[in-house]
Amino acid sequence: MPQNIWDFWANRYEKLWVQKYSLKPTRDLVVAELQKYIASEIEEELNLLDVGCGTGQLLEDIKEKLCQPNLALTGIDSSEQMIAFASKKLTNARVIVGDALALPFSHNYFDFLTCCHSFPYYQDKLMALQEFKRVLKPGGVLFLVQASENNVYDKVVMKLVKLTTGKAAYPSKAQIRKLVQQAELNLLNHKKIESQYFMPSIILSTLQNGDKK
Ligand SMILES: C[S@@+](CC[C@H](N)C(=O)[O-])C[C@H]1O[C@@H](n2cnc3c(N)ncnc32)[C@H](O)[C@@H]1O
């Protein structure tokens, strides 16, 4: 087993059963929400960063479905194998190995951040949100999605999931609200991702750095 569990999962990742019930519905909702912010053709370049981008599926979907040549896409992930996989198929996005807690980007650089199913694995979640805020422009928007333990059923299911991923913590909606407040981000809304009845809660939190643009 490699030291980084995600290196092990990299070339199996796109075949996992959770793609159908959790990961694809997440990508579809994030693309739809993002579209609300960039509905018409962009004239000036906008920058989007996907943190914990895995094999680059969300960046691929954004490229294909939004068709915005002026939306510059970047992905970062701490797994070398995930990034090796992503860089083979993504021709129009920059993908790099790096840590969500120490993003190698300057302050106020990105208009949008996405972070899907990666946040539970960060040791220091407040530090991650502070780092996200640092690289977001004022008014920039973060779409944060993950499984979220809000009841006993969620806790049981996520305990089983942890057997395959190692150490993780799936914050409840109340915990997300508290972290967001501490990081001084604005919570615009929480949305539950609708999937099959047997899936645990998956929550999209839309957050903004300061006031609306
Ligand atoms: C469940 S996968 C999610 C991948 C993709 N975002 C998706 O929605 O399918 C979790 C990803 O988070 C990455 N990850 C975990 N901890 C990280 C960290 N501290 N910094 C950057 N990426 C991290 C893992 O390497 C893995 O690719």
Image (spheres, rainbow, N blue to C red):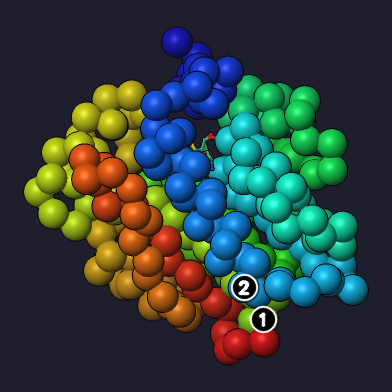
Q: What residue type is labelled 1?
A: Pro
Secondary structure state at the residue bearing disc 1: strand
Residue 36: give its label. 2
Residue 117, x across and y down, in percent: 45, 45
Residue 161, x across and y down, in percent: 28, 31
When the figure is inspected, residue 188 is found, relative to residue 21, above or below; the finding is: below
Residue 69, x across and y down, in percent: 87, 57
Secondary structure state at the residue bearing disc 2: helix
Q: How many labels does the image show?
A: 2
Q: In which quarter of the image is the C terminus?
A: bottom right
User: Going by the image, does 124 lie left or right of 105?
Assistant: left
The residue located at (46%, 41%) in the rendering is 23
Structural distance between the alpha carbons of marks 2 and 1 = 18 Å
When the figure is inspected, residue 40 is found, relative to residue 176, above or below; the finding is: below
Between residues 143 and 178, which one lies in front from this camera angle? Answer: 143
Q: In which quarter of the image is the N terminus?
A: top left
Q: What residue type is labelled 2?
A: Lys
Residue under numbered circle 1: 138
The residue located at (33%, 72%) in the rendering is 177
Where residue 173 sits, quadrant-wise, is bottom left
How crowded is the residue under tag 1: few (<14 C-alpha within 10 Å), some, or many (20+)?
some
Residue 54: give its label. none
Q: Earlier in the sequence, mark 2 or mark 1?
A: 2
Where residue 30 sits, quadrant-wise, is bottom right
Residue 202, x across and y down, in percent: 34, 52
Look at the image and tell me whether residue 80 can be seen: no
Label 2 beta carbon less than 8 Å to ligand 1: no
